[in-house]
């Protein structure tokens, strides 16, 4: 095709509606400004005050906080785009980004869908069909069965042919639902039934594929790009093996196991995959790499921009969103495969609002202070700012911390510094977990697989706080309150706060750290304080307190501690001591009623998705009672004992706070 003919088919974008939220919406708006394209945001009730809303040139309210009423409502999004004359819709990732029907609707309404063609999306929507296409085009696939015959007899026979251990996977959906690892033949039938049941409930489709289980595998993925003229390239690899709940936590490039020969082989397979789909935008081909045999196999194609795309941008200097826009406009790829070069090393860590010590359970709340250090090579992609709320409706990711440097060791050192200095106060986060992960000896040398967190990280140890850290934190919290009392005093202002007519009597205060109670005794002498924390004694000076931080000197060592107080809780952060949550105990505690036996409460703020039982119904131990949803994660409460449902206090579709009594089960 001649340059003249090519240029005549290019459609120039003047305005783009971003059908998404949070950090990815902000990221796309940034490229819109760079290219001189008008940006349009849509937002839900929960996102009215979110930073991304103010970053767009225009923003339109589209519905309630539930994604189904806003970011997943195709009619509303299309209507807004048409009313405002948007040339194109960028779906970001998640939500409608891999919805072939939505891509088709955009075309039917005369708007460009900034993503691959609907046929490619549709083909990759089924794991079984995806494997068949890749196998036909010479892309290595995991040995297994993905046939149409889903009878019990066929699945049992196919499983025995594949051999054990094996993996059962739902052909639809993702996120680990409908997935079972089967180690022994005697566990097979029960696993098939459970996987089918879970897949049917989650996706309305109980079809399964069976694969050889790679016991020591690494998750390696290649960024691909195609245009509308049959050109396709890969833009190097990302290592994404550090995962929890089948979701990535750390991504890096280049991969520690990648050689030039392996990169050439996997890159060629990724490009073959793109060509098999006539791929025409950004995508990612995911592989499982067997680090025992050195073989690699196709997993899936993500037909969208990935969360971790900044890692690739940092080592290549490319703007992948701009490349998406250009491809969607009809431009041919300006980059040839031979010109794709990586420089240095990049790593991304995902900061989540979650309790790593409690199986990474998401948490909600208000982030009172969010700040990070100015570090060369640091890029922060975030959906929040100081004062933002983490709600139950969306993913609990707070930010992506991306660091670039000349080599892996330098970048890891820099990211460790960033995590030590980062202030995210008001909610529990995985900040300390990320720090411990980065310092693990095996991770430092790149020796890990997809089971690393489960097998190598002691999550229970995350609840332990060193004595020095908790003592300094408790002293800081006490001095904060002392200073605040000093500022409020009007009577007997000449006497020191907490004055006693007995010199030997100290003031007392108690805190809870995790499940441990610590008690402090202290008294002020001239400009100094004497503290006793259990068996430790400290000479303390209050050096400075202003603007959310306190500087104190403890036995000759100065600490700058950042703090936020919410009710009786103190959220503290200090570079060398880490993050700490303290709760002050009331000196005159009110008696709390004992939790009622048989009561089932919400473990976190949630939406009630489905109530599976009725009042008066007999249930048995292990039976599902109620399905909750929080932050894109479903949680099913099951009966811990036999009994009868006495009372149900929740309603389907309703929102409940953490600790809310959902139903009462009597076992009399």
Image: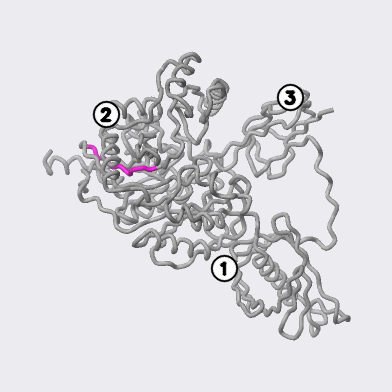
Q: Overall secondary structure of the magenta stretch?
A: strand
Residues rendered magenta in the picture: 220-228
| SS label for mark 3 | strand
- Nearest to the eye among marks 3 and 2: give it: 2
Up/down of 429 relative to 271, above or below: below
Task: State left or right for residue 151 relative to residue 309.
Answer: right
- Mark 3, other Cα within 10 Å: few <14 / some 14–19 / many ≥20: many
User: At which x and y percent is residue 39?
Assistant: 38, 50
Label 1 secondary element: loop
Mark 2 → mark 1, Cα distance in angstroms: 53 Å
Which residue is label 1 attached to? 576
- Tell me, for residue 137, which label it has, or none: 2
- Which comes before the other along the chain, label 1 or label 3? 1
Which of 556 and 522 lies nearest the eye of the viewer?
556
Horizontal side of 222 relative to 534 (left or right) equals: left
Distance from disc 1 to disc 3, alpha carbons, whole Å, reads 51 Å
- Depth check: 63 or 610 in front? 610
Task: Residue 223: say if magenta.
Answer: yes
Please report whichever mark, 2 or 1, sits nearer to the chain's N-terminal start: 2
Q: What percent of the width, then of the height, locates residue 106?
A: 36, 35
* Residue at numbered disc 3: 619
The N terminus appears in which quarter of the rendering? top left
Q: Is residue 594 magenta?
A: no
Percent position of residue 331, x then y? 22, 44
Image quadrant assignment for residue 640? top right
Residue 268 appears left or right of 418 = left
Is residue 483 something that shows in the picture? yes
Q: Tell me if label 1 and label 3 are in contact, CB under 8 Å.
A: no
């Amino acid at each position: 095709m001649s340059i003249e003919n090519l240029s005549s088919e290019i459609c120039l974008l003047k305005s783009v509606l971003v059908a998404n939220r949070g950090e990815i919406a902000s990221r796309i708006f940034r490229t819109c400004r760079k290219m001189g394209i008008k940006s349009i945001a849509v937002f839900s009730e929960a996102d009215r005050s979110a930073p991304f809303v103010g970053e767009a040139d225009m923003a339109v309210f589209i519905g309630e906080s539930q994604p189904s009423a806003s970011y997943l409502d195709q009619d509303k999004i299309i209507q807004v785009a048409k009313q405002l004359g948007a040339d194109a819709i960028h779906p970001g990732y998640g939500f409608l980004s891999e919805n072939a029907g939505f891509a088709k609707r955009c075309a039917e309404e005369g708007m460009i869908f900034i993503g691959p063609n609907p046929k490619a999306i549709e083909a990759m929507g089924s794991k079984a069909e995806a494997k068949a296409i890749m196998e036909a085009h010479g892309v290595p696939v995991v040995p297994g069965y993905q046939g149409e015959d889903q009878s019990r007899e066929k699945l049992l026979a196919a499983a025995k042919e594949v051999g054990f251990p094996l993996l059962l996977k739902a052909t639809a959906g993702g996120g680990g639902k409908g997935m079972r690892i089967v180690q022994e033949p005697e566990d097979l039938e029960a696993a098939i039934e459970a996987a089918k049941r879970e897949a049917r409930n989650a996706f309305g489709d109980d079809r399964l594929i069976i694969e050889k289980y790679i016991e020591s595998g690494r998750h390696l993925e290649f960024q691909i790009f195609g245009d509308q003229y049959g050109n396709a390239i890969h833009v190097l690899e990302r290592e994404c093996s550090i995962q929890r709940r089948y979701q990535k936590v750390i991504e890096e490039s280049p991969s520690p196991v990648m050689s030039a020969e392996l990169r050439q082989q996997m890159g060629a397979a990724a490009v073959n995959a793109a060509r098999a789909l006539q791929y025409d935008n950004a995508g990612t081909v995911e592989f499982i790499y067997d680090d025992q045999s050195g073989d690699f196999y196709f997993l899936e194609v993500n037909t969208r921009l990935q969360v971790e795309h900044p890692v690739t941008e940092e080592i290549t200097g490319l703007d992948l969103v701009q490349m998406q826009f250009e491809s969607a406009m009809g431009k041919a790829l300006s980059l040839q495969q031979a010109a794709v070069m990586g420089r240095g090393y990049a790593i991304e860590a995902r900061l989540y609002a979650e309790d790593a010590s409690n199986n990474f359970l998401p948490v909600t709340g208000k982030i009172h202070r969010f700040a990070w250090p100015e570090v060369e090579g640091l890029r922060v992609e975030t959906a929040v700012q100081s004062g933002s709320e983490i709600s139950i409706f969306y993913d609990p990711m707070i930010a992506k911390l991306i660091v670039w440097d000349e080599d892996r060791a330098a970048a890891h050192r820099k990211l460790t510094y960033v995590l030590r200095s980062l202030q995210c106060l008001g909610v529990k986060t995985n900040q300390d977990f990320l720090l411990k992960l980065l310092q693990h000896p095996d991770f430092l040398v790149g020796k890990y697989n997809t089971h690393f967190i489960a097998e190598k990280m002691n999550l229970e140890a995350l609840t332990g706080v060193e004595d020095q850290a908790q003592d300094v934190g408790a002293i800081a919290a006490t001095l904060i309150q002392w200073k605040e009392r000093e500022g409020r005093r009007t009577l007997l202002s000449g006497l020191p706060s907490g004055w006693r007519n007995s010199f030997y009597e100290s003031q007392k205060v108690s805190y809870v750290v995790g499940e441990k109670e610590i008690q402090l005794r202290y008294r002020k002498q001239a400009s100094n304080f004497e503290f006793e924390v259990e068996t430790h004694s400290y000479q303390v000076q209050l050096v400075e307190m202003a603007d959310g931080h306190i500087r104190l000197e403890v036995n000759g060592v100065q600490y700058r501690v950042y703090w936020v107080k919410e009710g009786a809780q103190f959220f503290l952060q200090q570079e060398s001591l880490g993050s700490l949550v303290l709760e002050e105990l009331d000196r005159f505690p009110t008696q709390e009623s004992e939790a009622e036996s048989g009561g089932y409460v919400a473990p976190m703020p949630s939406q009630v998705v489905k109530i599976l039982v009725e009042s008066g119904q007999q249930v048995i131990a292990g039976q599902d009672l109620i399905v909750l949803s929080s932050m894109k994660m479903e949680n099913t409460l099951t009966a811990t004992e036999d009994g009868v449902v006495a009372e149900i206090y929740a309603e389907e579709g309703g929102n409940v706070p953490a600790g809310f009594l959902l139903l009462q089960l009597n076992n009399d």
